[in-house]
Amino acid sequence: MDGRWVEVAEGVLVRRHTELDLNTGLVLGEQGCLVIDTRGDGVQGAELAAAVREVTPLPWRVVLTHAHFDHSFGASAFAPCEIWAHQRCGPALAAGAEADKKAWSEYYREQGRPEVAEAILAAEPVPPTHPVAERTELDLGGRVVELLPTEHGHTDHDLLVWLPEVSVVFTGDLVEQGAPPAFKGSWPLAWPAAVEQVLALKPSVVVPGHGEPVDRAFVREQLAELGRVAELCAEVSAGRLDRAAALRRSPYPEDFTADALQSVTNHSGHA
Ligand SMILES: [Zn+2]
């Protein structure tokens, strides 16, 4: 099995996957459970579903933090069931799934892992059944989960999953540990505000989309770095700084910053 459970609070488990250092989550109530993200294809989704069934026989609901393949393409292994996501996640999934399949199947082929490439190509993304437009509570029986849509950040549809009673938040890829944040297709200028929304919850445990669960101090540091990237992108957009200087001054490696600059260009005029 690819992964191990880590209990970050009573009845709140994070599954740490070797593949892409991904996190998925499992929240246990008295009447139901909530699965947070579903991995990257039908095979991986089935592995996660089996791992969930080793923990609990409770009926499940799924919430997707965002549409990227590694978080959403495994949902078919849980369907039919309620699938909650930001209201813009469904359209993003419909628009981006084919490009994700192409890019990532090529990536895995280059890595010498054709079976993963095939599984991604065969994946059947499932549209969310419950679009979230505003703060929404899910009652799992003795356990309330809050779904909090954000504006623009890692994507235009990042959804926070907040467990106020135990002070744990799942952020999807708005926060990342072990690697820099992924800027491809992102909204670098707006991203810091979304991370401020995370910090405003005053969470004790922050579960990033990839990497180890972290604390608020880690998130504050990442916020400062994201703020720096946003500043550099804004300076380049305004013609006050050249691209090479921005790449040099960034807290992140060149290719990450280059993705951020490209995203700002692509999204200029939209947000
Ligand atoms: Zn992502």
Image: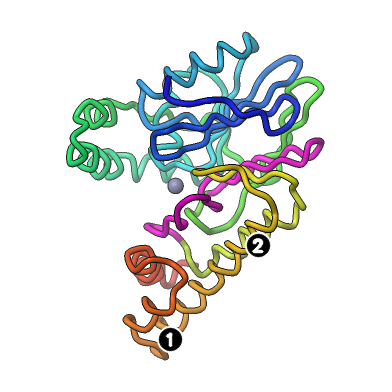
Mark 1 vs mark 2: give the one in front.
2
Residue type for callout 2: Arg
Does any portion of residue 266 appear in the rendered image? no
Which residue, as the protein is rendered here, is positioned at the far top?
A: 57
Question: Is residue 230 left or right of 169 when viewed as pictured?
Answer: left
Look at the image and tell me in which quarter the N terminus lies. top left
Q: Identify the residue under disc 1.
A: 238
Residue at 61% x, 43% y: name it.
213
What element does badge 1 sit on?
A: loop
Residue at 63% x, 48% y: name it.
214
Q: Residues within 10 Å of mark 2 (few under 14, many from 20)?
A: some
- With respect to residue 267, does 46 lie above or below? above
Magenta span includes 181:
yes
What element does badge 2 sit on?
A: helix
Does any portion of residue 30 appear in the rendered image? yes
Residue at 52% x, 50% y: name it.
177
Q: Which residues are magenta?
A: 158-186
Q: Position of residue 148 (x, y in %)?
A: 67, 46
Residue type for callout 1: Ala
Label of residue 220 in the image: 2
Asked which quadrant contains residue 269, the reply is bottom left
Query: How far is disc 1 from disc 2 in space, using C-alphas?
Result: 27 Å
- With respect to residue 140, does 161 lie above or below? below
Q: Is mark 2 within 8 Å of ligand 1?
A: no
Q: Position of residue 48 (x, y in %)?
A: 48, 21
Q: Nearer the viewer, residue 30 or 131?
A: 30
**Comes first in the chain, label 1 or label 2:** 2
Which residue, as the protein is rendered here, is positioned at the far bottom?
A: 240
Residue at 81% x, 22% y: name it.
142
Q: Residues within 10 Å of mark 1 (few under 14, many from 20)?
A: few
